Image: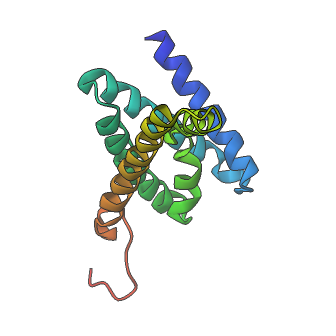
Amino acid sequence: MIKLLIEVLAAAIGTAAFSVLFQVRPKHYVFCALAGGIAWFAYRVITALSGSVFLATFLSALILTLCCRWFATLRHAPTLVFLLCGIFPLVPGSAIYYAAFYIFLNKGAEAAYYAAMTVKLGAAIALGILIAYSLPDCLFGWRHKNAKI
């Protein structure tokens, strides 16, 4: 349990640092950090429950995007401010690294395995974001100017 808490805290700090790099306004740093922590927490819990990295990546990207849409409503900011920073812990960096590593070692089978894993994880992230973005704005508190109340 403490290991998970340390991992979530590290993801939040890394996401906050990434938001500084992306020149996000300082008033959004806490919510950017929260987005990264939520994404990593969801990923670790779903991985532990299901055993599937791909399902965990998809569901955590979905949960992250839903949270970022809600944060955007609370903070009156674009969703991408929180999503671009919050997705940082879910990016399959090790798979990308190993794909490139094995390409340079001229080991085609290993390179193809990690390249395919990278593409699958990227597709899982994209699908999670796509599904969460397809939900109507009114679920997150947005009100359109011509909406009848």
| Quadrant in the picture for residue 112 | top left
Please, which residue is most extreme toward the top here?
Answer: 2
**Could you tell whether 31 is left or right of 131 in the image?**
right
Q: Position of residue 67 (x, y in %)?
A: 41, 49
**Could you tell whether 62 is left or right of 31 in the image?**
left
Marker count (numbered): 0
The residue positioned 33% from the left and 26% from the top of the image is 47
Q: Position of residue 88 (x, y in %)?
A: 57, 43
| In the depicted structure, whether residue 91 falls above or below residue 45 | below
Q: Quadrant of the N terminus?
A: top left
- Looking at the picture, tell me which residue is in the foreground, 90 or 86: 90
| Quadrant in the picture for residue 33 | top right
The residue positioned 37% from the left and 40% from the top of the image is 57
Q: Position of residue 60 (x, y in %)?
A: 37, 41
Q: Quadrant of the C terminus?
A: bottom left
The residue positioned 50% from the left and 62% from the top of the image is 79
Q: Indicate how the structure is coloured in the image.
A: rainbow
| In the depicted structure, whether residue 77 falls above or below residue 120 | below
**Could you tell whether 9 is left or right of 22 in the image?**
left
- Looking at the picture, tell me which residue is in the foreground, 23 or 123: 123
**Could you tell whether 23 is left or right of 99 in the image?**
right
The residue positioned 26% from the left and 23% from the top of the image is 49
Q: Position of residue 145 (x, y in %)?
A: 40, 85
